[in-house]
């Protein structure tokens, strides 16, 4: 066995051991609980733009985008735009690597790879910051409810032109809204790509962490994922990602399309 294969086998063993280590998983949930009381996820930026995510999930998304090599990434929930910038920059790297492999000159304006962001309220200062960013040429934004029929139809029409699609759901975190988003956008995910449902961690947190929010334990993205998967065997939870990260806002939320 060559050294690379030996290393990959060791990594797989590490992840399997972490998945079976319930004490470490419990410590991770305690850490998430206590740091979320001080809005830990708000502290980070990607290429200068606020990205409201754990660093672990940022790394996980980088790995997935490199693995899937999507032509279109659909994201519900824009906020300050950091996740859009992350996705756009990764698509730019994919194009650069393609150009190197093919021995061609990279023309960013000719790339087919795009990021499509949806939000019910794209605030003016956030839109201005996103549009001023060097990665903005890869980003399209639609303002409106992600579950409104006319918005869903518009996204489906756009997605028809892209052979590989990855979806990220991170807007309203109630069970009903996320389940509607799954029904609307998970079918666009291509085989061996992912639908990533963020903030499933809400199910594992105390209710008092979400004051004045319409979601909480029993009514959140994770309960929506569990409900959706009852009738959609074409998706499965990629537990290896959960076990690898341990600290994630999306436990049970990395859904791989297998059929």
Image: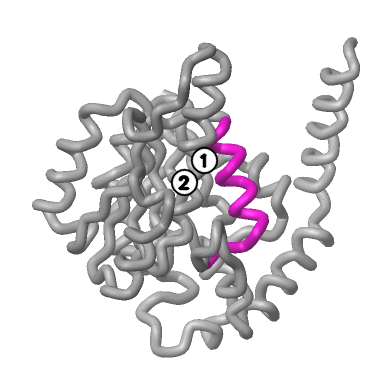
Question: On the picture, is 248 further left or further right than 195?
Answer: right
**Residues in magenta, as a range:** 52-66
Name the colour scheme. Answer: one colour
Q: Is residue 63 above or below residue 205?
A: above
Q: Residue at x 66, y 55 (%)?
A: 56
The answer to whether residue 147 is above or below residue 238 is below
- Labelled pair 1, 2 in contact (Cβ < 8 Å): yes
Taking the magenta stretch, the answer to whether it contains residue 213 is: no
Percent of width and height locating residue 79: 38, 68
Measuring from the top left, give residue 67's x and y in whole percent: 56, 29
According to the picture, the residue beneath numbered tag 1 turns out to be: 90
**Residue at (51%, 40%) from the top-left corner?**
90
Count of marks, rendered view: 2
Q: Main secondary structure of the magenta part?
A: helix
Magenta includes 59? yes
Q: Quadrant of the N terminus?
A: top right
Q: For mark 2, does the 10 Å Cα neighbourhood hold few (<14), some (14 to 19), or many (20 or more) residues?
A: many
Q: CA distance from mark 1 to mark 2?
A: 5 Å
Nearer to me, 52 or 199: 52
Residue at point 36% right, 33% down? 113
The front one of 150 and 108 is 108
User: On residue 87, which mark appears?
Assistant: 2
Q: Is residue 159 left or right of residue 211?
A: left
Mark 1 residue element = helix
């Amino acid at each position: 066995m060559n050294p690379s294969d030996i290393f990959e086998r060791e990594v797989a063993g590490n992840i399997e051991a972490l998945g079976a280590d319930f004490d470490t998983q419990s410590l991770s949930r305690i850490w998430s609980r206590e740091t979320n009381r001080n809005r830990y996820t708000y502290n980070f930026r990607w290429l200068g733009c606020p990205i409201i995510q754990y660093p672990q999930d940022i790394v996980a998304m980088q790995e997935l985008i490199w693995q899937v090599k999507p032509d279109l990434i659909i994201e519900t929930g824009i906020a300050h735009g950091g996740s859009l910038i992350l996705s756009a920059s990764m698509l730019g790297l994919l194009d650069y690597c393609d150009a190197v492999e093919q021995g061609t000159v990279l023309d960013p304006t000719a790339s087919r790879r795009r990021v499509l962001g949806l939000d019910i309220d794209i605030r003016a200062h956030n839109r201005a910051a996103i549009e001023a960013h060097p990665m903005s040429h890869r980003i399209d934004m639609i303002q409106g409810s992600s579950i409104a029929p006319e918005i869903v139809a518009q996204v489906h029409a756009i997605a028809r032109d892209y052979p590989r699609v990855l979806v990220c759901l991170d807007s309203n975190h109630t069970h009903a809204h996320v389940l509607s988003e799954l029904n609307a956008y998970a079918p666009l995910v291509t085989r061996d790509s992912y639908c990533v449902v963020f903030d499933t961690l809400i199910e594992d947190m105390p209710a008092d962490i979400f004051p004045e929010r319409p979601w909480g334990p029993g009514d959140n993205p994770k309960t929506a994922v569990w409900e959706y998967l009852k009738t959609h065997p074409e998706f499965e939870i990629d537990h290896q990602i959960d076990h690898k990260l341990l600290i994630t806002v999306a436990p049970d939320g990395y859904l791989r399309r297998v059929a």
